[in-house]
Image: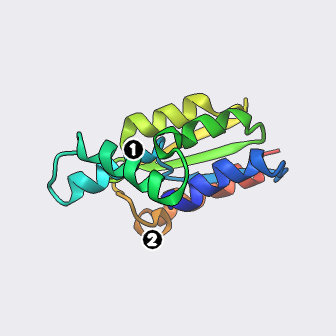
């Protein structure tokens, strides 16, 4: 979910990909946000540990991890986008989803919130809603 959606957000503009449509499920807005939610999941304070781990992990991997902000990549996505998020998600927060949605460059974008889902397969957890949303998105001209 998150990592795949983030890979799509980065790859489409970076590699000049031109898919007809894009479906994103639960992408995180910044790498620091992603690390922070993992800290909370193990009952540790998100701040300052998330910033420290993000910084050090970037140094170890040879990139500026504090500047890794997938929400910003959305500006360069101009094809139709279906963004899905689960209201019960403890890995990706609502403000992250709203940030990504707001920054998407597409004029044709839709946000679907799965009220009874967390960071999981929306298809498995809310099959009818997911199927209806995806079918409507894919069949829309």
Residue 93, compared with residue 128, is above or below; it is above
Q: Nearer the viewer, residue 132 or 89?
A: 89
Q: Which residue is mark 2?
A: 124
Residue 118, given in percent of the width and then of the height, sits at 35, 57
The disc, 2 or 1, on the residue closer to the chain's N-terminal end is 1
Query: Going 39% across and 34% down the picture, which residue do you hit?
Result: 95
Give the crowd class for mark 1: few <14, some 14-19, many >=20 residues within 10 Å.
many
- Label ID, residue 105: none
Extreme-bottom residue of the structure: 124
Residue 108, given in percent of the width and then of the height, sits at 72, 34
Residue 124 image-quadrant placement: bottom left
Question: Are dots 2 and 1 in contact, CB under 8 Å?
Answer: no
Q: Which residue is mark 1?
A: 32
Residue 91, compared with residue 75, is above or below; it is below
Secondary structure, mark 2, is helix
Alpha carbon separation for disc pair 2 and 1? 29 Å
Secondary structure, mark 1, is helix
């Amino acid at each position: 979910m998150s990592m795949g959606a983030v890979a799509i957000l980065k790859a489409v503009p970076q590699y000049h990909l031109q898919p007809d449509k894009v479906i994103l499920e639960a992408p995180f807005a910044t790498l620091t946000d992603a690390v922070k939610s993992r800290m909370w999941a193990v009952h540790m304070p998100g701040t300052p540990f998330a910033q420290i781990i993000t910084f050090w992990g970037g140094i170890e991997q040879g990139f500026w991890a504090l500047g890794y902000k997938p929400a910003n990549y959305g500006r360069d996505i101009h094809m139709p986008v279906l963004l899905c998020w689960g209201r019960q998600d403890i890995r990706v927060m609502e403000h992250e989803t709203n940030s990504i949605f707001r920054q998407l460059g597409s004029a044709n974008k839709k946000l679907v919130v799965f009220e009874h889902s967390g960071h999981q397969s929306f298809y498995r957890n809310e099959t009818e809603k997911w199927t209806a949303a995806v079918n409507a998105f894919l069949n829309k001209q």
